[in-house]
Image (tube, grey):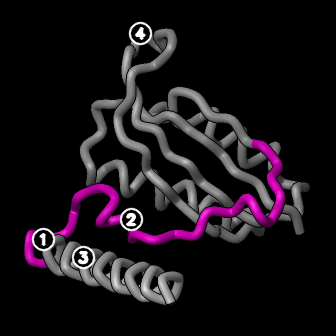
Amino acid sequence: MSYYETMYIVHPALEAGRLKDLILSVESTLKDFGGKTHTVETWGKKKLAYPINKEKYGMYVLFQFEADGTNNKEFNTTLDHNTNILAYLTTRIEKDELIEEKKSLDSQLGLLNKDENTSDKKEDNSDNQKDDSVEEVSENQEDK
């Protein structure tokens, strides 16, 4: 099995809930073709270098997966026929280029409740505090 990543640009008018549905449909299409999803990362709305279908902005989504490569043409054809996807590019990558997924798709799209978002932030802050204490300990050991 080989590793691939597909960067696709979604129509900017899609709301977060509909964007999630689109991302999940792309994942299920890949699964139907025998692939396995590794990471989905939403990069948000960005200005395009040139207009695509008269759109100046697009929502960027990075999708990394594992597949044998025999069905990549069919997978790309399904992306091509989706009217909500403005453009896409699939490339082969090495295993060490895979991104470790840190946030759920809901948190990336801002679909979580405020309580869940604050608990995520508290967890992130506690991780940062642990990192700071590790740095302080290493600095103290260097002084000795």
Label 4, label 3: how far apart the Cα atoms are? 42 Å
Label 2, label 3: how far apart the Cα atoms are? 20 Å
Label 2, label 1: how far apart the Cα atoms are? 13 Å
- Outermost residue on the left side: it is 114
Mark 4 vs 3, N-terminal side: 4
Label at residue 6:
none
Residue 123 on the magenta span: no
Residue 142's spot in the image, x, y percent?
A: 53, 82
Residue under label 1: 113
Range of magenta residues = 91-115
Reply above or below: 41 against 114.
above
Q: Amino acid at mark 1?
A: Asn
Residue 138's spot in the image, x, y percent?
A: 49, 84
Label at residue 125:
3
Q: Amino acid at mark 2?
A: Leu
Label 2, label 4: how far apart the Cα atoms are? 28 Å
Residue under label 2: 105
- Mark 3: few/some/many CA within 10 Å (<14, 14-19, 20+): few
Reply above or below: 57 against 99.
above
Q: Could you tell me which residue is drawn at 39 percent across and 21 percent down?
A: 47
Secondary element type, mark 1: loop
Label at residue 54:
4
Mark 2 vs 3, N-terminal side: 2
Frontmost residue, 139 versus 116? 139
Q: Amino acid at mark 3?
A: Asn
68 vs 141, left or right, is right
Label 1, label 3: how far apart the Cα atoms are? 19 Å
- Mark 2: few/some/many CA within 10 Å (<14, 14-19, 20+): some
Mark 2 vs 4, N-terminal side: 4
